[in-house]
Each structure stands twice: as C-alpha cells, then as structure tokens.
Image: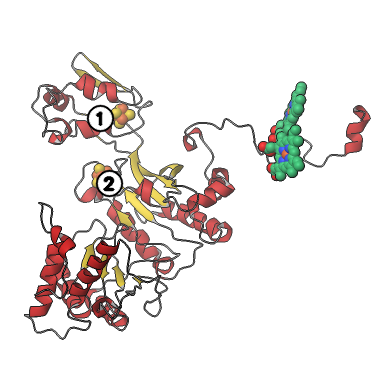
Amino acid sequence: MAKHATPMLDQLETGPWPSFVSDIKQEAAMRAANPKGLDYQIPVDCPDDLLGVLELSYNDGETHWKHGGIVGVFGYGGGVIGRYCDQPEMFPGVAHFHTVRLNQPAGKYYTTDFLRQLCDIWDLRGSGLTNMHGATGDIVLLGTTTPQLEEIFWEVTHNMDNDLGGSGSNLRTPAACLGESRCEYACYDTQAASYNLTMEYQDELHRPAFPYKFKFKFDGCPNGCVAAMARSDFSVVGTWKDSIKIDQEAVAAYVAGEFKPNAGAHSGKDWGAFDIEAEVINRCPSAAMKWEGGKLAIDRSECVRCMHCINTMPRALHIGDERGASILCGAKAPILDGAQMSSLVVPFVEAKGDFDEIKEVVENIWDWWMEEGKNRERLGETMRRLSLQKLLEVVGQEPSAHNVQEPRHNPYIFFKEEEVPGGWDRDINEYRKRHQR
Ligand code: HEM
Ligand code: HEM
Ligand code: SF4
Ligand code: SF4
C-alpha cells in the first residue's frame, strides 16, 4: 500500500514509454520489503515521499524544494547539490534530498560488476534513485542526507576507485562521444582525451577557482554526438586535413542498391531508389563533388568536411588519414546575454599522445579568463565583452579567415597604436597651423 495517494502520477504509468512512476514505485516496494535485510541509512520510505511531494507539485503547479543548499565533502568545493523539501513535516523522507555527482567513465561503458557495487552503496546510503546520466555526463545519485555524504565519498573512493564529479564555479565533469571505441568516423580518441584532461585538471574540477563554470566536451567528428559545440565552453571536434577516401566499388554498390544509404537510417519510409546525384552530389554544401561516368570525385580544397557524404555512404567514403581536431570556444545557455554556440578559435590541432597542444590552449584561455572574466561571466560572454581578437591573441592563434563566418559590416574598427604611423599623441596647434578655426 503506497504511503501517499498519487492519482495524477498514476496516469503516467499508462502508455508505451518506460514510466518513471512505475519504476519509483517498484523501488519503494523493494525498500519496504527489504529482501537483503539492509540497515537503511536514510528513511526507508524516501521514494514514497518523493512521489508524494511530486504529486503535490503536480496539483499546485509549483516546486516544493527550498532555495539552494550548501553541502559537500571535506577537501572539495563541489560535487554535491544540496536540497531540502519545503514541506518536511508532510514528507520527512525527503526533508534532505541531496544529489551526489559521480564522475562517469568516458563513453559510459560499464561492467555489471561496477554498477552492482555502486547500487549496493546507494541502496544502503541513499534513496535508491538515480539519473543515468546528468546532462553534463555524471552518474547522478538522487537523494540522500547530509551525514551520509562523507560515508558515500569514503566508499566510492576506497572501494570503487571512483571520484565525485564537478559542480560550482569550476571545471565541470568532461564528456566525450564514444569515439574510436565504436565509430569509424572518429578522428581522434575522444575518450582518451576526455580521460586525460579530466585527470590533468582534477584540482580545477574539485576546487572552484574560476569566475564561473567551465565545461569540456570532445566530439570525434563534426556530427557532434556529445554536442560539444552547443554544450561546452571548450569544444574539441575531430576532423582531417587530407582527402576523403573513396572506394569506387562501394560507391557503385550504393548506386546499384546493394548498400543502403545512411546505413538504413531512413528505412521506415519509402524514399525511392538511392539517387546519388540528388542525395549526395547536390546536397554537398560547397558543391565539391562530381559524379561522372560512374566515378565519384571530391575537390578536397573546397570540401568543408561537413560529413554529409560520409554519413550517407559510410561503406564507400571514409575520413582522411591526417587527423586532428578543431577547438571552438564560448558555447553557453541564454543567461545572461543570450545563447551562444562555440566559435572557431583553432582550426586544427594535433589530438594525440598526452594532448599537449590542446592543454596549451586550455591553459592560455584559463590564464586570461581567470584574471579578466567578471564574476559569473561565462567564457562566451567574456569573449563578447573583450572580443574574439583578444582570445586569439591569448591563445597565440594568428587570425585567419577561418575565424569568422563573415567579416564585420560596421566600420567601428580599433587599431593598435603601433600600427598607425605617428601614433595617438597629436598636438591641436600643429593641426591649427593648417586649418583655421
Ligand atoms: C563631407 C561630409 C562629411 C564627412 C566626410 C564626414 C566624415 C566623418 C568621419 C570620417 C567620421 C569619423 C568616423 C569614425 O570615427 O570612425 C565622422 C563621424 C561623424 N559624423 Fe561626419 N562627415 C561628414 C558630414 C557630417 C554631417 C553633415 C554630420 C551631421 C549633421 C555628421 C555627423 C557625424 C557624427 C555624429 C559622427 C560621429 C559618429 C560616431 O561617433 O559614431 N557628419 N564623419
Ligand atoms: C540633451 C541632449 C543629448 C544628450 C544627453 C546626449 C547624450 C548622448 C550620449 C550619452 C551618447 C553616447 C556616448 C557614448 O557612446 O559613450 C550620445 C551619442 C551620440 N549623440 Fe547625443 N545626446 C544629446 C543630444 C544629441 C543631439 C542633438 C545630436 C545630434 C543632432 C546627438 C547625436 C549623437 C550622436 C551622433 C551620438 C553617437 C552615437 C554613436 O556613437 O553611435 N546627440 N549622446
Ligand atoms: S561525434 Fe562523430 S566520431 Fe563521435 S560518435 Fe558521433 S559520429 Fe562518431
Ligand atoms: S564532407 Fe561535406 S563538404 Fe565535403 S565533399 Fe562531403 S558533402 Fe561535400
């Protein structure tokens, strides 16, 4: 028998999609039955009270979490999101309902052994509820009390060799697309880059030292499966410098209908027979492709490496061999001065070994932004306030046509004094000798 009546939430148990309500009820029933005989460290009915407070919010259309909450573990300045219910007498099981962020493995590959250990810790010391995963990437353990935080931290570090993720004005948990682990488009080892930079900058991740939050994300190619260009201040996106590799026989197999276009992604609808002219050649954004006499040709100098032709004929077209990545900066959500996607800063860097070229760019940007960024100003906003030109200067990137989509159309152009013959110090009396008042 459920603790609270939840008529509105019950409606969300219908329909084909996996119901979070059914799942939470199942966890509530499991805790009540307690088949393992656990000595639960937080209220056994925590999930029931979560459903209770959620039902109340569904009724009155308002949240019932109090403002903010500052909790954590010694040594770190972030990692836990504190939260308290504003109706603690009605729902004592969620009076404390803190969220613990745990750093996830890059690409989110797990063994059942690891997940079982984690669930064992969380069943005992938390609500039994999770988010797999937070939008930044972390494993999110949803709901526990303050006294359990150090206990959980001790167990995940000592027994599982796992650390917390980031929160606050610091480097947040980096994330990567699954990259070379199972994608033939990957231009560098995104998981290795994500892991390497996460380890390199542990201090910046655990102890807030920045004007505001800062995120890294690593995409293996411009398809953007981890959406680095939209969801990270520092976006690393794989690409190549040489030519797309063309397997003419495989192209013929697509044209003959033996291979499915886009690996069968549109097979749910009849789009007719594959038409290489209409679906690839004429879709190339830079008209860099030719289909003549049963042969496909690509003008490498015009190709912007958009991925369209490769995505459409993955068995015939392949990324080049001179691989690396582009670095783009400044993506952020709307608050304060409007949403931004990242802007291209470094068109091509090496992305291998210890990723030293990438780290150099990171550290140059941090040196600048940590000094010049205003309180709670994202890198994207600092770039707007102090200019892309300033960012290129601190990164040591020679400005090139690649850095802009189009040149400015207003003439409010600043020159450096040393660029202008004679400099800025002028005497009006000299001028008056030639021009009367
Ligand atoms: C042959 C006629 C004119 C020429 C060659 C001329 C040229 C210029 C130039 C070179 C500037 C400086 C732009 C800059 O700082 O980047 C300027 C600014 C300005 N001019 Fe003229 N101008 C002319 C007529 C006028 C007239 C008739 C008015 C007003 C009735 C005017 C109002 C202004 C104003 C307000 C600015 C300052 C704009 C700003 O600071 O953004 N100009 N003009
Ligand atoms: C009480 C009267 C006025 C006040 C208080 C006033 C105030 C201002 C202020 C605060 C600015 C911005 C300065 C900056 O960019 O830092 C400005 C710019 C300007 N004002 Fe006025 N103004 C007045 C009258 C006028 C009049 C009568 C004209 C022209 C007939 C004029 C033309 C301009 C122009 C062209 C600019 C430059 C706009 C730009 O930089 O884009 N203003 N004014
Ligand atoms: S971003 Fe590119 S390399 Fe990474 S998984 Fe997606 S398609 Fe593959
Ligand atoms: S990757 Fe894009 S720009 Fe390059 S040839 Fe293919 S479709 Fe054209």
Q: Is residue 272 above or below residue 192?
A: above
Q: Horizontal placement of 41 versus 37: left or right? A: right
- Ligand 3 contact, mark 2 (Cβ < 8 Å): yes
- Where's ligand 2: which quadrant? top right
Tally of marks: 2
Residue picked out by circle 2? 225
Q: Is residue 61 above or below residue 157?
A: above
- Amino acid type, mark 2: Cys
User: How far from the left and from the top, in percent, is residue 263?
Assistant: 14, 35
- Ligand 4 contact, mark 1 (Cβ < 8 Å): yes
User: How far from the left and from the top, in percent, is residue 101?
Assistant: 30, 68
Pick the quarter of the image with the C terminus: top right
- The image's mark for residue 309 is 1
Image quadrant where residue 272 sits = top left
Q: Residue at x 26, y 76 (%)?
A: 94
Q: Nearer the viewer, mark 2 or mark 1?
A: 2
User: How far from the left and from the top, in percent, is residue 167?
Assistant: 38, 66
- For the residue pair 264 and 419, the one nearer the viewer reads as 264
Callout 1: 10 Å neighbours few (<14), some, many (20+)?
many
Pick the quarter of the image with the N terminus: bottom left
Callout 2: 10 Å neighbours few (<14), some, many (20+)?
some
Q: Horizontal placement of 224 versus 78: left or right? A: left
Q: Earlier in the sequence, mark 2 or mark 1?
A: 2
- For the residue pair 329 and 423, the one nearer the viewer reads as 329
- Amino acid type, mark 1: Cys
State the separation of the CA atoms marked 2 and 1: 17 Å
- The image's mark for residue 92 is none
